Amino acid sequence: MKRTIAIYPGSFDPPTLGHFNIVERALKIFKKVIIAVAENTSKQALFTFEERVGLLKKIYKGSKSVEIDHFHGLLVNYAKKKKAKVILRGLRTVADYEYELQMSFTNKNLFPELETIFLMTENRLSHISSTLIKEIAYFGGACENMVHPQIAESIYQKIQEKHKK
Ligand code: ADP
């Protein structure tokens, strides 16, 4: 599989240590991981997709095996454009499993050659979710143990800006 490219799609709003751990472990299996930030997310976004791409690019600056990109519309169309046949996703909970199962079936229906590969979260990172981080930071809590320090800084700044409005 070391010849294969995997696309890791998601909201990454914000990117967390859980996400980075999935990428790091996936690189032992795949030759390259493309982190693809979804432009169209139904979740309440803290950062614009351009900002999320910017945050990820800073973290992976200089890496030859991690590419940062974004996509609009159907993931299967993006995968075809990138000539990739593997989607990488992480699993934490039973709730994740149900959602991911449905998504992978749907994508396979739309593009039968596409395989979704799941990596289980690491126990120490299983509680980390972008949604919870946003809530914690919004109410003044610390999230440094869940995100990269540079990203924690950007989260606090962004929340301050939002509070001012
Ligand atoms: P989406 O909105 O597409 O679910 P997310 O950014 O929330 O995007 O998550 C992207 C992927 O990363 C999902 O497969 C999710 O299950 C996985 N993921 C998120 N947090 C973790 C974590 N702490 N450990 C493992 N996988 C995770």
Image (cartoon, grey):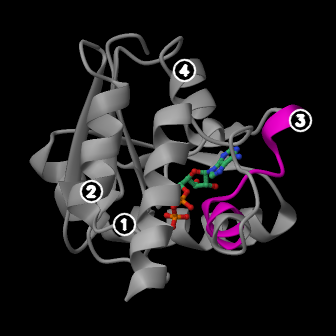
Mark number, residue 24: 4
- At 62% from the left and 29% from the top, the residue drawn is 21
**Number of marks:** 4
User: Crowdedness of circle 1 by 10 Å Cα count: few (<14), some, many (20+)?
Assistant: some
Separation (CA) of disc 1 from disc 2: 6 Å
Q: Position of residue 120 (x, y in %)?
A: 75, 39
Question: For ligand 1, which image quadrant applies?
Answer: bottom right
Which amino acid is tagged 4? Glu
**In magenta segment, residue 134:** yes
Span colored in magenta: 123-135
**In magenta segment, residue 125:** yes
Which amino acid is tagged 2? Glu
Name the residue carrying label 1. 47
Q: Position of residue 31 (x, y in %)?
A: 35, 14
Q: Residue placed farthest to the bottom in the image?
A: 165
Vertical placement of residue 149 versus 36, above or below: above
Which amino acid is tagged 1? Phe
- The residue nearer to you, when weighing 159 against 103, is 159
Separation (CA) of disc 1 from disc 3: 27 Å
- The residue nearer to you, when weighing 126 against 90, is 126
- At 51% from the left and 15% from the top, the residue drawn is 29
User: Crowdedness of circle 4 by 10 Å Cα count: few (<14), some, many (20+)?
Assistant: few
| Residue mark closest to the camera, 3 vs 2 | 2
Look at the image and tell me in which quarter the N terminus lies: top left
* Among numbered discs 4 and 1, the one appearing first in the sequence: 4
Name the residue carrying label 3. 123
- The residue nearer to you, when weighing 135 against 10, is 135
Ligand 1 within 8 Å of disc 3? The answer is no
* Among numbered discs 3 and 2, the one appearing first in the sequence: 2
